[in-house]
Image: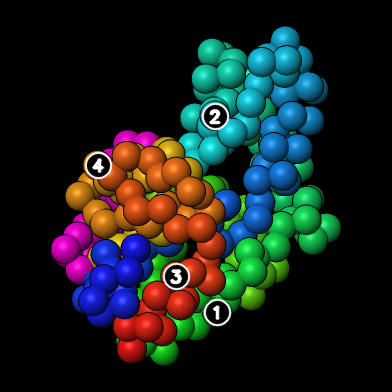
Amino acid sequence: MSGPTGEGPVAGRRVWLCDLDGTLVDSFPAHEAAFRQAIAELVPAALPSFRYAGHAGASTAEVAALLTGDRDVAARLVRRKQGLYREFVAAGRVRPFPGARRLLDRLAAGGRVAYLVTGGSRGSVERVLAGSSLGACFRDVLTADDVPVSKPDPEFYGLACRRWGVDPAEAVVLEDSAHGVASAVGAGLATLHVHTAEPAPGAVAVRGLADIVAMLEEGQ
């Protein structure tokens, strides 16, 4: 993914829009465990066919609505799943991926601005950021509680760009899920699909965060 400058597709892009779950923090196991326990308690018939990987990147509310088809049950499922997940965060089960802090520090050192654009709820996101000490790395945070849509809708990233006055031509997105990539690419944003060898359509594959750091350092 390197070009003549060493920065390849992110050369000259000073604004970074970063996803959180599965991108900067290893939260997949905790999210899956929270969902499975909540589903077992409230909609057990849905548990055998539930595969969290198929919903990664979507909001908890959207997943609950798909699973239940009942507004009241869905609301209860959301509350229970979020409560369990936040317990797991407090227990230290969600940690930054290797290279996450180094990448964010590298962006700041290079004069780049990082924003967080996540489909997580604000309460959960704030707990993860506090526990991982990553919160101060972002100029601002956009969560599922702040917008009327969810990834993969392109409006999720479109709203983020309008909220912060970001020119898509000057920005790059860091995502880990097909839902997130679809949202970013649909909004016309250059997108890095991290932790994968096979990128979703429109994105550039990056195996790990350390690879992005190396790319940025080569382009100094």
For the residues labelled 3 and 1, say whether their Cβ atoms are less than 8 Å apart: no
**Which one is nearer the viewer's eye here, 169 or 5?**
5
Compare marks 2 and 1 and give the one earlier in the sequence. Answer: 2
The residue to which callout 1 is attached is 102
Compare marks 4 and 1 and give the one earlier in the sequence. Answer: 1
From this view, report whether residue 6 is shown above or below residue 61.
below
Q: Amino acid at mark 4?
A: Gly
Compare marks 3 and 1 and give the one earlier in the sequence. Answer: 1
The residue to which callout 3 is attached is 212
Going by the image, does 107 lie left or right of 190?
A: right
Going by the image, does 134 lie left or right of 16?
A: right
Q: Which mark is residue 144?
A: none
Q: Which residues are magenta?
A: 152-170
Compare marks 3 and 2 and give the one earlier in the sequence. Answer: 2
Q: Amino acid at mark 3?
A: Ile
**Looking at the picture, how far across and down is residue 214, in whole percent?**
46, 77
SS assignment at label 4: helix
Going by the image, does 116 lie left or right of 56?
A: left
Q: Amino acid at mark 2?
A: Gly
The residue at the far right in this view is 91
**Which one is nearer the viewer's eye here, 16 or 148?**
16
**Looking at the picture, how far across and down is residue 128, in whole percent?**
64, 61
